[in-house]
Image (spheres, rainbow, N blue to C red):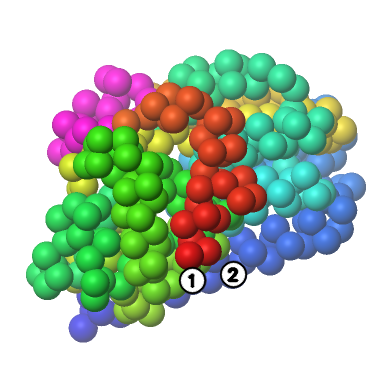
Amino acid sequence: MNGMKQNGLKLMKRTTAIALSAVMAFSLAACGGKKDAGSKGDGESGDKITLTNVSYDPTRELYQEYNKIFADYYKEETGKEIEVVQSHGGSGAQARSVIEGNDADVVTLALAHDITSIENAGMIESGWLDEFEGNSSPYKSTIVLLVRKGNEKNIKDWDDLAKDGIDVIAPDPKSSGAADWGFLAMWYYAKEQFNGDEEKMKEFVGKIYGNVLVMDSGARGATTTFVENKQGDVLVAWENEALLTLAEYPQDYEMVTPSISILAEPSVAIVDENADKNGTQEAAKEYLSYLYTEDAQRIIGKNYYRPSDEKVLKEFKDTFDLSVNLCTIDDFGGWDQAYEDFFADDAIFDEIYSK
């Protein structure tokens, strides 16, 4: 009974976090992205600095923990207090909110293309991808399948999601970075299965999306639909979301790693236009740089993201399947090409989903 109460509390916290993040993102954008003038003090020269981190859906818990150790580090190094305001939502939607006025000092989004869109709006300086290590990706992930305990539908790989009678829960590629990575993983699997026959590949991936029962705007919303609302037979999920669910409900769910998935590289960047205006360039750079320290990398692993530091990653060899066959975004010509081919208006996703 106590376990049930504990799980119930976790569910409430997760749902509340979604609602609060949505309100935060809306409020910042609705105000033209302007914060209370007192909240920043005198930029970096004030006694207290406030940074806004606009991030994608499932990173709430990660940054709640990371922000605490970073604040302690920053206080020790500079003598200044720092507060980090978090905003979460579907990665594509979050990028648009920054362009429309959400006053982000930094963005920590699900894929490089979403940050490139902010760059193209003139808000991030070119070269941001090389500003931090590993293509400015301090942690990695992949896409897996989450099923209910017992796996009654015997779901083992992507082809099972295309079968009749399978209800799939997946986020929307038009607003969610996880959905984009998931789509590409399916597509690469289909390419291998059908020897590059594009018509058969479109038909296959189209069948999967034809089975999607609910298409949420973000990855955390899709997890809520599957886990809390009990809809669907299988969830196309971030690995970290699946592992978090297993940790909370070990008796209720199983994770299935498909035969082929994709190396997902969430990206980070300073929003230069806002950081310059707010006087937070130095603090923003420290905030993102500190993600690469061993202490931060261990917090990343604890929150079920794959540390980019190979030494720390090995400490979590029992958490992650490090032998999984992963394609990469380079197999699609990079993110600009992948977006144009698959996710732009009237591209392949629109073509197969409209049928």
Q: Quadrant of residue 67?
A: top right
Q: Is residue 120 left or right of residue 178?
A: right
| Residue 255 pos. (x, y %) | 20, 56
Residue 184 magenta: no
Contact? badges 1 and 2 (CB < 8 Å): yes
* Residue at (27% x, 62% y) in the render: 162
In this figure, which residue is indicated by the disc labeled 2? Answer: 19
Query: Dot 1, crowdedness within 10 Å: few (<14), some or many (≥20)?
Result: some
Q: Which residues are magenta?
A: 302-326
Calculate the distance from the C-alpha at mark 1 to the C-alpha at mark 2. Answer: 6 Å
Amino acid type of disc 2? Answer: Ala
Q: Position of residue 7 (x, y in %)?
A: 31, 73
Q: Is residue 293 left or right of residue 86?
A: left
Hey, what amino acid is under mark 1?
Answer: Thr
The residue lying at 89 percent from left, 47 percent from top is 37
Q: Which disc number belongs to residue 15?
A: 1
Foreground of the two, 354 or 83: 354
On screen, residue 199 versus residue 50, left or right, reads left
Q: Could you tell me which residue is drawn at 79 percent across and 56 percent down?
A: 29
**SS for tag 2?**
helix
Answer yes or no: is residue 73 visible: no
Q: Quadrant of the N terminus?
A: bottom left
Measuring from the top left, give residue 87's x and y in whole percent: 63, 53
Mark 2 is surrounded, within 10 Å at the Cα level, by few (under 14), some (14 to 19) or many (20 or more) other residues, namely few
Q: Is 243 on the left-hand or right-hand side of 318? A: right
**What predominant SS class does the magenta segment belong to?**
loop
Residue 275: name its quadrant. Answer: top right
Q: Is residue 184 above or below residue 150?
A: above
Q: Secondary structure at mark 1?
A: helix
